[in-house]
Image (spheres, rainbow, N blue to C red):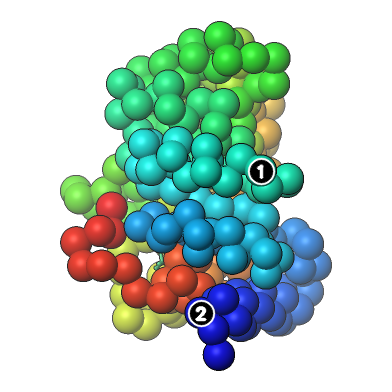
């Protein structure tokens, strides 16, 4: 077997597990987008995943995103999501390249992205707000208490639209232990959706990774972010 067919096999196995998890809870598989996480994965491997049918890809590092997007610019319908910590001086590499930015976690970052998006062109920049659902010191994202205030800031945005929430719960070997955190994010979304805000429509929940995406789907994820289950293990120390 060639590397490309191994990769296609793993991608299709993950796609089937996504569909099976949807069926278990009576959801349509089209409701859940599979985001293939490609940090540290070479552009040639990303191209193989595209050829096997993947269309949505997630990157954690701004320059890596820019370089791969240039290298793969010939692939129609390929959609990039930015899922890493975003520094304000790197916003220029990401806005306009990533169709979605999933990691807005402060008013200053929102302003920087909005300003850049206004220059970059007519289509609004789709973003998600990252929530630190377990309140872990080591994780980025706003606290549940800060979330409402940040969502209110979108009223003043000219070129950004908030399409939902993203989270990364604590890591567990046992996926069931992540379930309460996914359920918390969904409840938070449901509660905050009862009040209309301009430029905010919390229709997406980005949650679930290789170890726990099925549980996340059962709890309402609309975007799952899967890296190692598709591309294999990453080099140690590259897990930002
Ligand atoms: C790396 C990463 C993923 C994918 O993790 P896997 O365990 O390899 O599936 C998902 N989301 C974020 C934010 C990541 O940084």
Residue 3's disc number? 2
Number of numbered labels in the structure image:
2
Q: Residues within 10 Å of mark 2 (few under 14, many from 20)?
A: few
Residue 123 x %, y %: 69, 21
Q: Secondary structure at mark 1?
A: loop
Name the foreground residue: 67 vs 95.
67
Q: CA distance from mark 2 to mark 1?
A: 22 Å
In the rendered view, tell whether residue 218 sits above or below residue 66. below
Which residue is painted at 43% across and 27% down in the image? Answer: 93
| Sequence-first disc among 2 and 1 | 2
The residue indicated by pointer 1 is 74
Name the foreground residue: 210 vs 175.
210
Residue 77 x %, y %: 73, 46
Which residue is painted at 80% across and 67% down in the image? Answer: 28
Q: Secondary structure at mark 2?
A: helix
Which residue is painted at 56% across and 9% down in the image? Answer: 119
In the rendered view, tell whether residue 57 sits above or below residue 73. below
């Amino acid at each position: 077997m060639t590397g490309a067919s191994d990769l296609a096999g793993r991608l299709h196995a993950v796609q089937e597990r996504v569909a099976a998890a949807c069926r278990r809870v009576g959801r349509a598989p089209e409701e859940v987008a599979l985001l293939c996480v490609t940090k540290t994965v070479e552009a040639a491997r990303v191209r193989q995943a595209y050829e096997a049918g993947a269309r949505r890809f997630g990157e954690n590092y701004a320059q890596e995103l820019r370089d791969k997007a240039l290298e793969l610019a010939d692939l129609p319908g390929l959609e990039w999501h930015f899922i890493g910590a975003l520094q304000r001086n790197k916003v220029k590499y990401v806005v306009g390249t990533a169709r979605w930015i999933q990691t807005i976690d402060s008013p200053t970052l929102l302003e920087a992205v909005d300003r850049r998006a206004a220059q970059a062109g007519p289509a609004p920049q789709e973003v998600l707000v990252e929530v630190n659902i377990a309140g872990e010191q080591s994780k980025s994202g706003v606290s549940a208490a800060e979330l409402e205030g940040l969502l209110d800031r979108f009223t003043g945005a000219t070129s950004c639209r908030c399409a939902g929430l993203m989270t990364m719960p604590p890591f567990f070997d046992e996926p069931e232990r992540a379930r309460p955190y996914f359920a918390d994010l969904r409840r938070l979304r449901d509660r905050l959706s009862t009040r209309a805000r301009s430029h905010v429509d919390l229709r997406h929940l980005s949650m679930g990774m290789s170890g726990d995406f099925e549980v996340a789907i059962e709890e309402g994820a609309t975007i799952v972010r899967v890296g190692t289950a598709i591309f294999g293990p990453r080099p140690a120390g590259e897990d930002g």
